[in-house]
Image: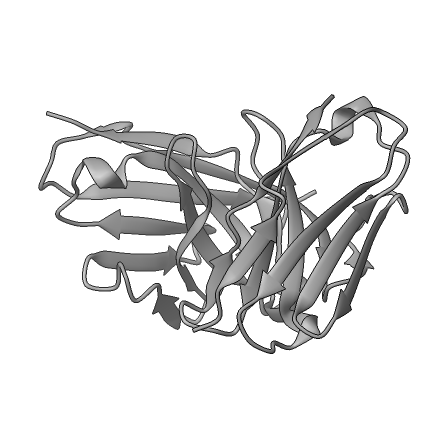
Amino acid sequence: QLQLQESGSGLVRPSQTLSLTCSVSGGSIESGGYSWSWIRQPPGKGLEWIGYIYSSGSSDYNPSLKSRVTISVDNSKNEFSLKLSSVTAADTAVYYCARGFLTSGFDFWGQGALVTVSS
Amino acid sequence: DIVLTQSPGTLSLSPGETATLSCRASQSLNSAYLAWYQQRPGQAPRLLLYSASIRAPGIPDRFRGSYSGTDFTLTISRLEPEDFAVFYCQHYGGSPLYSFGPGTTLEIK
């Protein structure tokens, strides 16, 4: 069974860079033609797609965050990562990593990692 | 850009009843690119349906998806206590590439 696990700093200072990694187990990040996404959810609010990456390195981002987001992949470690720069309190959220496939939605999700932006 | 609107915002029902949740798109979209998720408190979303009406593995047949034009419906029959949660619809293919509706809360009456 595929499993995804987020890790990274839970507290980030305003104007700094948020960094998270998603470790994938139970399957290879390179197989099946899947995309690997980051999705966030501010406390008590809805879901926002941040961006995705393929094992090839091809990526796409939400235009609203594009100037501040970088998603990278490390196939040798079977993991992908998120960097979000110049964070503010509005970036406080639970960050999820998830596997996606075109028409099939996001079928596997990590448990989520709460990141708080505060001084 | 396609905007998804979900209604009602909150639905109060009792176990055993049938829930009908709506997701309306602001313009025509490919039904193949519409998915539904359930999110229980403190948990990650769980994929229920994709391509508007195809159940994800392990999802019971009490969950059914249908659509007509820009209106998509999630019907949950014979509600069980574990069904009460927040439900999101999600579209692929617009800008941003993936977008979610605001959600419908299904609560126990």
For the N terminus of chain A, give its image quadrant: top right
Lateral position of residue B35 relative to residue A78, left or right: right
**Vertical arrangement, residue B96 with respect to residue A92, above or below:** below
Q: Does the rendering let one see residue A65?
A: yes
Residue B22 in picture, x, y percent from top left: 68, 53
Lateral position of residue B104 relative to residue A76, left or right: right
Residue B59 in picture, x, y percent from top left: 82, 44
Q: Which residue occupies 47% across, 51% down?
A: A78
Determine the image quadrant of residue A66: bottom left
Q: Does the rendering let one see residue A28?
A: no
Q: Which residue occupies 54% across, 56% down?
A: B5
For the C terminus of chain A, give its image quadrant: top left
Residue B25 in picture, x, y percent from top left: 58, 67
Q: Between A104 and A56, which is closer to the camera in this rendering?
A: A104
Question: According to the image, what is the colour scheme of the structure?
Answer: one colour
**Number of marks present in the image shown:** 0
Residue B47 in picture, x, y percent from top left: 67, 48
Determine the image quadrant of residue A53: bottom left
**Vertical arrangement, residue B97 with respect to residue B36, above or below:** below
Q: Which residue occupies 86% across, 38% down?
A: B18
Q: Between B100 and A6, which is closer to the camera in this rendering?
A: B100
